[in-house]
Amino acid sequence: MNDAGQADMADRSDIERIEQLLVELEARLKSPGAADELAERGVNTSLALVAVQGVRAYVRGDKAQAAEDLGVAAEEIRHRAQLHPGGDPQAN
C-alpha cells in the first residue's frame, strides 16, 4: 500500500470514529435523564437530534440532507429564540 492509500485508511478510521461518536451522542440525547436536563436549560431534544443528524449527514458527504437537517434546526432554534428573547428555560 502506498502513502496515499495509508492516509486514506487513516482518514476512514477517523471518520468511523466520528460517526461512532455521533451515534453515541444521539443515544445520549434520547435518554430520559439527558432529555430532562436539557429541558431544564430550555433545549429541545428533538431539535438537538435533528442537528446531530445533520452533522452525521455532512460527515457522510450527504450535503443535501445535511443542509436540510441543519437548516431546519437553525430555523426552528432562531424562531424559538425570537419568541423568548430572554432565554426562558421552559420555552424549549
Image: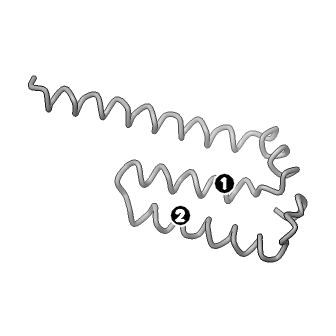
Residue where numbered disc 1 is placed: 48
Residue 92 placement (x, y as % from top left): 81, 62
- Which type of secondary structure does the marked residue at label 1 adopt? helix
Establish if 53 lies above or below 74.
above
Q: CA distance from mark 1 to mark 2?
A: 10 Å
Q: Which residue is pictured at 63% across the width and 73% down the height?
A: 75
| Residue in the image at 54% along x and 63% along y | 70
The x, y position of residue 51, in whole percent, is: 59, 56
| Residue sitting at x 19%, y 26% | 6
User: Are the residues at dot 1 and dot 2 in contact (C-beta closer than 8 Å)?
Assistant: no
**Amino acid type assigned to the residue bearing label 2 in the image:** Asp
Locate residue 76: give its quadrant. Answer: bottom right
Nearest to N terminus: mark 1 or mark 2: 1
Query: Which amino acid is tagged 1?
Result: Ala
Residue displayed at 77% across by 71% down: 80
- Where in the figure is residue 47, as x and y percent of width and height? 67, 59
Left or right relative to 18: residue 30: right
Query: Residue 69's mark?
Result: 2
Q: Quadrant of residue 63?
A: bottom left
Query: Is residue 12 left or right of 53 when viewed as pictured?
Result: left
Which of the colour schemes (rainbow, by chain, secondary structure, one colour) is used?
one colour
Task: Determine whether the residue tagged by mark 2 lies in a helix, strand or loop.
Answer: helix
Query: Could you say which quadrant of the image residue 83 lies in?
Result: bottom right
Residue 43 in the figure: left or right of residue 40: left
Looking at the rendered structure, the number of numbered marks drawn on it comes to 2
State the quadrant of the N terminus: top left
